Image (spheres, rainbow, N blue to C red):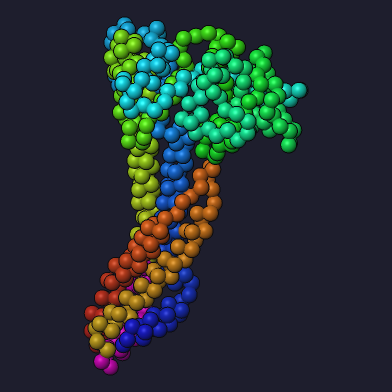
Amino acid sequence: MTVLDDLRSAVRGLSTNKLRSALTVLGIFIGVGAVIIVVAYGNGSSQAVQNRIKALGTNTITILNRGRFGRGPATGGTQSQSATITAQDVTAMSDPNQAPDILSVSPVLSSSETASYTGASDSGVSITGTSPTYLTAEDYQVQAGTTLTGSDVANHSQVVLIGQTVVSDLYQPGQNPIGTEVYFGAARFTVAGVLAAKSSATAAIDPNNVAIVPYTTAQDLLTGYTNNFTQLIVQAKSSNAVNAAEQEAADILASANQTSVANLPFTIINEQTLLSTSASTSSTFTVLLTVIAAVSLLVGGIGIMNIMLVVVTERTREIGIRKAIGAPRRAILGQFLTEAMLLSLIGGLVGVVVGLIGTHFKINGVKPVPTAGSVIGAFAVAVAVGVFFGFYPASRAARLRPVDALRYE
């Protein structure tokens, strides 16, 4: 018999009991679809986490003036609450001789106030007092108006850059905010610029409900004068220099506070380390979920073996007749193996379609990202499962002796 003859025979055999064949196919396509969907959601979740980390800035290191550095318990007295992040630290980190891998250092003073303008208000606006380099480090773009300048910082200018959420809450559609005066609490600022919208899909807080002012003005009007910044945003010269820039910043802070790097009472967040850790964790989690989903393929394969054993039993006399008239063992083997492969092939194709449809739906805001590798791999495994689990029943049919098969009732 030719391959085409085997295929025709397989189609006839499977069509004699359509419901049984459909239920067998169901086990395969559920497994294939589950693998595709799980991998897609794993990739989507990983990308969402990495996008959230990247939103912290471009090649940046964030130094928070709270908590611990995380490299061991404090043992000395110099790492107490008196440790600070000062303007002198900013100057030292900006010195290329002391920190050759640091591109810029942006001091940050944080506050939260209610913004108001001609009767409209926006509560809980996140106010950042900083320097002009902050905008580049945190990937903010000025959509309209002017940006912060060094002169604004030096002159304690009462100017502000506002985000899109603040604009929509305070102004009428089409109204130009540039040049208007907005109150943050009791402090009055002139709107110098409007920030371009930033994606909030992966952010824990709204990155557009912000106001950015010179840090000197924030000290004057919002936080009160302090020589201790809330945090520093340190931008490395390249992605390859982030770790070196982190070490240089830590060394400078340790020297300024007369302690060791291990005992610094600051939290240092390295974007590259977070990205690497999140990628590794997401990959492990995706592999685990994929293995769990692949178990359904194994169950589907067992279903194929079970059904094919039943088919062989039901068609024992047919096998005996074919062998009695001269059909070789390989013809019988090919016939039943083709039936098993056809079941897995149909199940695999349906599973691919269902899996790809399933990746068009979001779960908890996560957009799934299907990959060609997962689709091809799941389909290939489905076919392999059909061959593997169909071989034993087909081999059993091929080994039947004609006299025994013809005697079977």
Give the camera-side residue of 179 and 284: 179
Query: Residue 33 lies in what quarter of the image?
Result: bottom left
* Most common secondary structure along the magenta stretch: helix
Residue 142 visible in this rendered orientation of the protein: yes
Query: Residue 349, position in %: x, y?
Result: 44, 67
Can residue 320 be found in the magenta stretch? yes
Q: Residue furthest bottom?
A: 325
For the point 46% across and 19% down, the residue is 107
Residue 73 visible in this rendered orientation of the protein: no
Give the camera-side residue of 325 and 158: 158
Q: Residue furthest front?
A: 151
Whether residue 181 is situated above or below residue 42 in the rendered picture? above
Query: Residue 329, position in %: x, y?
Result: 24, 83
For the point 56% across and 14% down, the residue is 155
| Picture quarter with the N terminus | bottom left
Answer with left or right where residue 199 lies relative to residue 87: right
Can residue 14 be found in the magenta stretch? no
Query: Residue 203, position in %: x, y?
Result: 52, 35
For the point 40% across and 8% down, the residue is 81
Give the camera-side residue of 169 and 295: 169
| Picture quarter with the C terminus | bottom left
Q: Which residues are magenta?
A: 304-326
Query: Residue 59 lies in what quarter of the image?
Result: top left
Whether residue 28 is situated above or below residue 74 in the rendered picture? below
**Total numbered circles:** 0
